[in-house]
Every structure is written in structure tokens, then in C-alpha cells.
Image: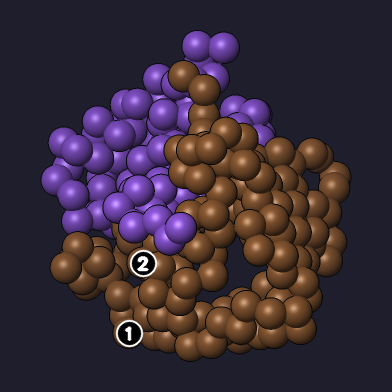
Chain colours: A purple, B brown
Amino acid sequence: MNLRRDVFQAISDPTRRAILLLVASQAMSAGAIAANFDTARPTVSRHLHILTECELLTQEQNGREIFYQTNIIKMKAIADFIEPFRQMWDERFNKLEDIMKKHPRKK
Amino acid sequence: MEQKTKIHAEDGKQELTITRSFDLPVDLLFIAYTDPEIVEQWMGTKVIKLENKNHGGYQFETTDPMGNKHLFSGCIHEIIENNSIIRTFEMNNTPFPVQLEYLQFEAVTDNTSLLTMHVIYKSVAIRDQILKLPFAQGINMAHNRIQEIQSKI
């Protein structure tokens, strides 16, 4: 249960979601992954660490470099990516609620 | 903590249900769906047309950070004030087919309400593809520097 929550936290970040999509088709080194982002390399490393820790990514040593790839079984476990969809709606509805709380009520 | 927005999507079904509880009276929640200016604010879209009547139509337009315009539109089949909206929804110029949406607005107390959105898609495959859309959007952010900068403005 706790682990499950960690997985959802892991994919709540847009950069981490992008990393998962990047490596979905092929295993990539940390350097190759970082090259796709504007973010500083240590930040990308931190994201990779979190994704590996909650087992969404698996590591494989290849010569001097570590390659990352998605853990298909774990990815399936996050209910086919429903969580980002839920968060998209949650953000919209939060906005709606904030706006309407300030709205004068017609009576 | 209990999540305010819940998605219920069973495996192998072409529908899903979104529920959300609001700290708002039901009439204010309904206004958020029918007042064009307010829709623009929380949906982040431009409202071109919004006919709140039976057999009315609506059309929204969003502009992405690259300046591309995306149209969303549909027909309002039935609308009952502070109660329900039955409408279709379509992302124009995309391969995604029209979906049918049943929106139910319910008062829980005088100051709280519940929204239930029952969405029916053309097929199981289409539903699952649409579920993955927000996920796919992450990649654009990663790949496009300009997009990332502009979205912050």
C-alpha cells in the first residue's frame, strides 16, 4: 500500500513522466536521458533515482555506463496511467473551486 | 487523505466515471459550467460558443505554447439547471471520435456538492488512449525548450 503511494508520487511529476516515456521504447544511459531535458543533470539524476527506487525503472550495467529501462510489470500496476489523467482533472477542479469561492452568489 | 477527485475506470470497458466533491453550493458549481467567462478561467480555453439549452452547441478553443490552435466542440443534448448536462465532446482535427458525457450535479449540503461525470467512448481502445493523453503531454514539455519557457509566462 505504501509502495503504491510512492509510485503515484513518482509519476506525479511531469519530468518523471517524460523520462518514463523516453525510455519506454529503448534502454538509455543517464547522459542520453539528460540530453533530452533542459533541467540540470543532477536534477535528472535525482528523478532517475526516485523512479528506480519505486521500481518503475530498472538499471543495467553496460560497460562503464548504467542503462535505464522501464519495468513493464510495475508500469502495468499503475492502472494504465490513470493517475496523470486524474491529476489533470483534479487540477482543473481545484481551479474551478478557487474561482467559484470568490464568486458572488446570486440569490 | 481522501482524494477529492476520483476516477473509476474498469478494465475492458469503454466508459469511465469521474467524481469530485466541491466545497461549493450546487448552484455555484453549475454556474462554473454555464458562464462562458468562468469556463474560460478554469478550463484554460477560449469559449467561442456555449448555448446552454436543449439541442444547443458549444465550441472551445485552446492555444498551445507553440501557437497552434485546438478546437473542442460538441452538442448539448439536454441541460437541467443545477441538476444535469448531457452533451457530446469532440477534439476536432484529431483521430479521436466523439464521446458522450453525462454530467450530474448534486447538492450534498447547502455548501457542498458532488459532480459525477460519466463518459462513454467509442471503444475500449479509444478510452485507454485518451486516459494516456496527459501522460503523453509530458514528453512535449521535455522535448521543447520554447514550449517550456512560454508556458510559464
Q: Nearer the viewer, residue A101 or A19?
A: A101
Residue B8, position as x, y percentages in the image: 71, 38
Disc 1 and disc 2 on one polypeptide chain = yes
Residue located at (35% from left, 48% from top): A101
Q: Is residue A59 at all visible to an observer of this figure?
A: no
Which element carries disc 2, helix, strand or loop? helix
Residue type at the position of mark 1: Gly
Residue that badge 2 annotates: B41
| Quarter of the figure with the C terminus of chain B | bottom left
Q: Residues within 10 Å of mark 2 (few under 14, many from 20)?
A: some
Q: Chain of mark 2?
A: B
Determine whether, in the image, residue B104 is placed left or right of residue B6: right
Determine whether, in the image, residue B14 is placed left or right of residue A67: right
Q: Is residue B143 at all visible to an observer of this figure?
A: yes
Q: Chain of mark 1?
A: B
Residue that badge 1 annotates: B67
Residue located at (77% from left, 72% from top): B78
Residue type at the position of mark 2: Gln
Mark toward the start of the polypeptide (1 vs 2): 2
Residue A77, position as x, y percentages in the image: 64, 29
Residue A90, position as x, y percentages in the image: 47, 45
Q: Residues within 10 Å of mark 1 (few under 14, many from 20)?
A: few
Residue located at (56% from left, 49% from top): B26
Q: Which mark is residue A91?
A: none
Residue at the extreme front:
A107
Which element carries disc 1, helix, strand or loop? loop
